[in-house]
């Protein structure tokens, strides 16, 4: 597989690779929505500090350079960072997993669906034979995204720390 583009966009949303200078933007986005995120994102359950933001941005650079994870800021049409998304190699050769989160204020406006659509197209462009989305069984907003993008539900698996995740996939077009 090839490395995805550093920036992706459609006529509404822009995904751009996270940069070290995004620390304050990332911290504000997460801190402003910590109670909204903590329910679904284990990394947000104990709060989020400036040091957490710095570590995350450093790992974004390192993981991208290693070809393991490709994380993007989700930038809304008004230029505000609305969340984060990425492609991850956790499902083995040929597969890329999509992850995403939005701030409370930007949820429900279709930005995550647009981001996931861009990531799906990019995953196939760089050579993935399948794309996977995993979400908590109780997260109805996250469930709507793979449904809208015509993914197929594969089943469930235990969620680390308790609960159940739902796994979806979509094969590359032939």
Image (cartoon, grey):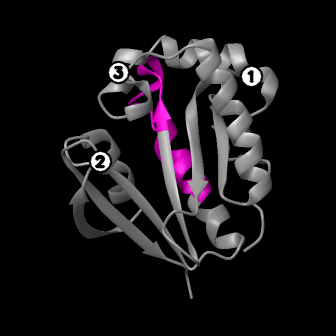
Q: Tell me the residue at 80%/53% (across/down).
A: 65
Residue picked out by circle 2: 160
How far apart marks 2 and 1 lie (CA) works out to: 29 Å
**Quarter holding residue 153:** bottom left
Q: Is residue 18 visible?
A: yes
* Residue 94 forms part of the magenta stretch: no
Nearest to N terminus: mark 2 or mark 1: 1
Residue 4 picture location, percent across and down: 75, 59
Please report the bounds of the magenta region as a residue range: 101-119
Q: Is residue 15 visible?
A: no
Element assignment for label 3: helix
Residue 149 picture location, percent across and down: 42, 60
Residue picked out by circle 3: 36
Nearest to N terminus: mark 2 or mark 3: 3
Nearest to N terminus: mark 3 or mark 1: 1
Q: Tell me the residue at 41%/20% (across/down).
A: 104
Q: Is residue 102 above or below residue 105?
A: below
Q: Is residue 52 above or below residue 164?
A: above
Element assignment for label 1: helix
Q: Tell me the residue at 56%/13% (across/down).
A: 49
In the image as oriented, which residue stretches furthest toward the bottom? 174
Residue 45 picture location, percent across and down: 36, 24
How far apart marks 3 and 1 lie (CA) works out to: 21 Å
Q: Quadrant of the N terminus?
A: bottom right
């Amino acid at each position: 597989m090839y490395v995805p583009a550093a920036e992706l966009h459609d006529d509404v949303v822009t995904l751009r690779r996270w940069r070290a200078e995004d620390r304050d933007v990332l911290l504000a986005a997460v801190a402003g929505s910590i109670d909204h995120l903590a329910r679904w994102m284990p990394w947000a359950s104990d709060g989020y500090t400036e040091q957490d933001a710095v570590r995350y941005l450093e790992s974004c650079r390192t993981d991208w350079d290693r070809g393991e994870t490709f994380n993007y800021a989700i930038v809304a049409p008004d230029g505000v960072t609305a969340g984060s998304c990425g492609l991850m190699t956790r499902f083995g050769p040929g597969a890329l997993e999509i992850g995403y989160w939005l701030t409370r204020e930007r949820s429900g406006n279709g930005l995550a669906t647009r981001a996931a659509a861009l990531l799906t197209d990019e995953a196939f462009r760089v050579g993935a034979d399948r794309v996977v989305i995993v979400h908590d069984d109780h997260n109805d907003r996250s469930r709507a995204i793979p449904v809208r993008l015509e993914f197929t539900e594969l089943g469930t698996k235990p969620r680390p720390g308790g609960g159940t995740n739902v796994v979806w996939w979509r094969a590359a077009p032939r």
